[in-house]
Amino acid sequence: MAELQFREAIRAALNEEMRRDDTVFIMGEEVSEYNGAYKVTQGMLDEFGGRRVIDTPISELGFGGIGVGAAMNGLRPVVEYMTFNFAVVGMDQIINNAAKIRYMSGGQVSMPIVFRGPNASAGQLSATHSVAYESLYAHFPGLKVIYPSQPADAKGLLKSAIRDDNPVIFLESEQMYGMKQEVPEDEYTIPIGKAKVKREGSDVTIVAHGKMYHVATKAADQLAKDGVEAEIIDPRTIKPYDIETVIESIKKTNRCVIVDESHPFGGIAAEVGFQIQRDAFDYLDAPVRRVTLPDVPAPFAKSLFDKWFPSPKQVIDAANAVMYRN
Amino acid sequence: MAELQFREAIRAALNEEMRRDDTVFIMGEEVSEYNGAYKVTQGMLDEFGGRRVIDTPISELGFGGIGVGAAMNGLRPVVEYMTFNFAVVGMDQIINNAAKIRYMSGGQVSMPIVFRGPNASAGQLSATHSVAYESLYAHFPGLKVIYPSQPADAKGLLKSAIRDDNPVIFLESEQMYGMKQEVPEDEYTIPIGKAKVKREGSDVTIVAHGKMYHVATKAADQLAKDGVEAEIIDPRTIKPYDIETVIESIKKTNRCVIVDESHPFGGIAAEVGFQIQRDAFDYLDAPVRRVTLPDVPAPFAKSLFDKWFPSPKQVIDAANAVMYRN
Amino acid sequence: MAKTKEAEGFTPTGVVYQSTELPEPTSKSHKDLNLSKDDLLGLYRVMYRQRRFEERAMQMYQKGKFGGFLHLYMGQEAVSTGAVTVLNDDDDIITAYRDHGFGLVRGVSSKVGMAELYGKATGCSRGKGGSMHFFNTDEHYWGGHAIVGAHIPLGAGIAFANAYREEKRVTMCFLGDGAVDQGSFHETLNLAKLWNLPVIFVVENNGYAMGTATKRHTSTEIFKRARAYDMKNKVVNGMDLFSVIEDFREVVDEVREDPQPYLLEVRTYRYRGHSMSDPANYRTDDEMKEFQDIDPIERLKTYISRHKIANKDKIQEITDDIEQEILDAIDYAENSDFPPEEDLYKDVYVEDDFPFLT
Amino acid sequence: MAKTKEAEGFTPTGVVYQSTELPEPTSKSHKDLNLSKDDLLGLYRVMYRQRRFEERAMQMYQKGKFGGFLHLYMGQEAVSTGAVTVLNDDDDIITAYRDHGFGLVRGVSSKVGMAELYGKATGCSRGKGGSMHFFNTDEHYWGGHAIVGAHIPLGAGIAFANAYREEKRVTMCFLGDGAVDQGSFHETLNLAKLWNLPVIFVVENNGYAMGTATKRHTSTEIFKRARAYDMKNKVVNGMDLFSVIEDFREVVDEVREDPQPYLLEVRTYRYRGHSMSDPANYRTDDEMKEFQDIDPIERLKTYISRHKIANKDKIQEITDDIEQEILDAIDYAENSDFPPEEDLYKDVYVEDDFPFLT
Ligand SMILES: Cc1ncc(C[n+]2csc(CCOP(=O)(O)OP(=O)(O)O)c2C)c(N)n1
Ligand SMILES: Cc1ncc(C[n+]2csc(CCOP(=O)(O)OP(=O)(O)O)c2C)c(N)n1
Ligand SMILES: [Mg+2]
Ligand SMILES: [Mg+2]
């Protein structure tokens, strides 16, 4: 085991897959000469050269679509968006072309492409730069969506994503790039679509992915001090979503809080909460609660930002609410 | 009262507001000389001239953004997308600029703009042309979203939308344009954000908006024959969503089915279902169920399309399920 | 109704512009173009197949035999035909939704094409795509795309993959005049030039984007767009097959030799409305007649007669053959099965056991 | 680290290009340009304010006084300053996220600007926008926009509204060289030309989009983009205030008289990295020095001395004034309150009672 930063784990996955398969290449803004806006791709130009590590202009629609075309014609592109906030101008290529061409062509076209980059907020970057897009992409059939919370998951899942013949959205976080974790040194992959119980507990189920996983663990630590044992489930993959693992847990705890960095309307929490009430109605001793962003764009001011961003305190309050503790 | 087609009701709203206020204008593809791809804007060029009824190139990002800029600088644009499927390439202007500039400028900028056009499927038009976008727009703070099901609602709500100082997404349907209804001849508006109980019943609440409202009424007719009295609520506005009216109904029926033309993941049904279980848990005698599109892009073949599109039968089955009738 | 009143307001209204001025057709003979007599008859067959396929498809649509949109290519057949004449079989083609012609010249048989229009399981896209989504990737035909402009980067991406593998394949990416106003056009042309991709962007300027004349939607001549990228470019007479072949061949050879993108503005005309619901009142009968007088299929037929490549009977034979082929295609389509219900969930993802959400 | 190895792969790598070739500066004197002595001193004050504001802001950022991104305009001040010199007060300005300079020349005081950087309620955008979103709409300054290219259609839309009302206001829409590769640029230029909108698109080509030299991200000279639309265009020396004033004035006057869009490529240079986290290793010290040697503020100062417009003391007085102004601004920002928590929900919608979802 080696301790790797999140960015190093992602880089390791990229390097391994590029060594393994010449059809894999990466393109995006500043990925090559600059070694990545967030240094994820550091050293890759040196190893793989400008044919496979390609800088692009600020043309998300154009290079995203070139990635899609290259995937149709036999390559396995990894398209990096500097952040997913900028993928919005290129979204048509993802939700219409990458997601649907296989279907519209009656299965003639393969679409082995990964769109990856940081997602959601990264501190005080204001309203346009702080959106969590996982629920949006998960809404569209044809895509898989992954948003890992820890380096080891990230590495194994990214390798699976690159090998997958479907288009995969792989979400990261500027704020997690520096986080460290022991990562197995041997080659491994992690199957897409499998949640993981990351902390066991019998009092309440907390479901949290991506950056919110870390908010949830803080809350769980505090709850434990108060004698409440929270079970934390990290779905890791958003689509397909492993609802079975969540429901298994709820059969034990009978209570659930979902922590989600999206705005509330139709976010992950809404979807998962809906499924839980539908499929585990009789196991619920309390309604499912959610902790999300408020339905407000990201403010700049620190005072407001701190209030905007989901906190462990909110998770604790929600856990207490579903347990009917004062 | 005059009987108007849906398209005529929308046109009447546009005409009335343009007569009333010179800052209101409309632009979009084929709205002017061609009189509208779906003839919504028929005759408007003749009445208002090319200064106020403006044809655009196929540049949804460009003319959408010009609309936003014009709204910032004192006009009240109505931007028509030939359909909302094409707004995807211009979505950044809606979800980032129109929705957020007021907030980011600390309230200095007003954004009185309406984006309107047909939404969701219109028969066998294949995968890219058949998406229901209401949940996507409703996800983003700063926007209001309206999707009426009937001409009289459409007219009153569109007039309110044009007078609203916030950006409003106003969704229509090619397949409803020909539907007729009595529409009051006197000037009227309908407040944004108010649901309407359109059929009373005490056995089950069916919530359905837009095109799905008509699927729901067919189901309710059939259910009535089977002795089941369904209450139908048409939210009319998707954001803000009038959940109170829905919950009032559930307090009576204790059961709810949501009919939604979106794909399931994070669609309107997920959101509304989540809120119901959270806020009316103790009134529910059964989990909330949803009838949505399958999680599959729109197929072309009629055999598949008919299976894809939500049917009254599915609504009836869901109603029976929440009532635990075989 | 075509009006003539003065322009007023923002977009010029009311004025019907001469939408496309054609360059002089080539004066080369078929021999100059290295075409044998058999080639010419083959070309006639291919062109007429496209025409007749659509004439019949139109009838079937009007009879309510199938639904969806139907955008007819009639009048533009010299473009698709010229393209496949000069391309190698493993060169790549992609286009927008006005795609029947390209399908038919790239291995989609009349049967399989008609079946797709009918939404049958035997269709070239298994009935999943319909008129706007003809695909035949085995023969390097990448569809059929319905969002205006969205396939332009795909064309560049296909060329990118060829360049990446150091294959000498050339990609032709066809688009309508309306698509040049999309951001995707601009982003892709810049990228293609920056990366020297072997892709030819062929704008089929048929005078109109739906009801909007070219000069009402785009601020100057389309070929000038290339100047923004120092990209090579040319205007082509798309109503004359020989001209198309001559110009396309020159450009394809150049791009294959010296990989770089090219912008071609092919001036042509669509005879029918934008789609079946469009009465095309925005143009004059005179304009229509002007182009029908130089119909590319008639022109080839005349050439064949005049140069005694074949006699009337031979031409009639081909015409009859095609007539029968299309009637058979209709039978085939009508007698084919719709896709079974379980196909709804097929090919959304690669795997057969994807856990679909309900 | 600037490398010099040969280009390989798709985007040329490893080569550091001379990023911007400057046109000759104007030889006109201040009198030729109708500028009084007082004007010159005023211009110096305005330019130096922008510089000093940012130098101090940088220090405060490095001390951790505030967060977010900080993109500095240093080196480009002649552009903002030249613009307001020739524009009327009710002409409109909009720009991207490198926006402090434009705020300061358009009525955002140093205090209120600094407070915005600190995210205080007294900031020019009430602390909601931060560095990238300076606004002062009362003085026709429309922000501060952070998605590359997204504000270009807004600029055209502002001009559209002016044209609609038949007001003779001119809009200047500033953008970076990186933004010319966005689809929004293309769509907007075509629309602006088609509709004759009175908007001037000013590309501040500062040689780099983040770490990518202009010639690595765009396939040819930026001013040539105008040719795609038959749009008037010009290259401007952005390191020399007099040149900016001369060229901008000519163009603004022309656009006001004869409404139509214009594309200006202003060649300039940013002294600092893209944002505070960028060490700017992609460029050479020599290149940096070359531009610092022709610093627009120093150049104006030299002109003022050489032409005896004012003596050293007068200049020092202005310098000291500004120094104090900026220090006061920092005090002001530090002593201002953060927005109260309830502001989180303010100005999302116009109404105060919007029923927010939880
Ligand atoms: C982004 C987008 N906007 C609008 C449409 C609707 N639409 C379909 S075809 C068309 C006209 C396109 O004209 P052109 O590119 O000239 O092609 P032609 O139909 O002449 O072959 C329009 C507006 C669309 N499909 N996609
Ligand atoms: C659509 C989009 N893509 C990427 C980014 C990230 N980004 C911010 S600034 C920038 C470089 C822009 O360079 P340029 O336009 O030359 O402006 P300059 O920074 O030189 O003023 C990039 C890539 C963004 N904000 N928006
Ligand atoms: Mg056309
Ligand atoms: Mg720059």
Image (cartoon, coloured by chain):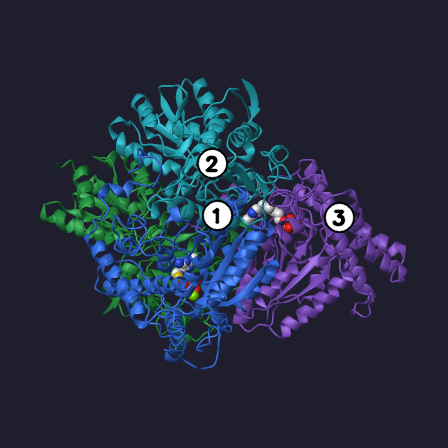
Chain colours: A green, B cyan, C purple, D blue
Q: Residues within 10 Å of mark 1 (few under 14, many from 20)?
A: many
Q: Nearer the viewer, residue B80 or A242?
A: B80
Residue pointed to by mark 1:
D158
Residue type beneath disc 3: Arg
Q: Nearer the viewer, mark 3 or mark 2?
A: 2
- Residue drawn at 59 percent across, 39 percent down: B31
Residue type beneath disc 2: Phe
The circle drawn on residue B170 is 2
Chain of the residue on which disc 1 is drawn: D
- Residue drawn at 36 percent across, 79 percent down: D285
Q: Is residue A18 left or right of residue C120?
A: left
Mark 2 element type: strand
Residue pointed to by mark 3:
C52
Residue D17 drawn at (x, y percent):
46, 76
Q: On the rendering, which quadrant does ligand 4 occupy?
A: bottom left
Mark 2–mark 1 distance (CA, rounded to whole Å)? 23 Å
Question: Contact, CB < 8 Å: mark 3 with mark 1?
Answer: no
Tell me which corner region of the image, top left, top right, bottom left or bottom right, holds residue B254: top left
Mark 3–mark 1 distance (CA, rounded to whole Å)? 51 Å
Chain of the residue on which disc 2 is drawn: B
Question: Contact, CB < 8 Å: mark 3 with mark 2?
Answer: no
Q: Nearer the viewer, residue D325 or C245?
A: D325
Chain of the residue on which disc 3 is drawn: C
Mark 3 element type: helix
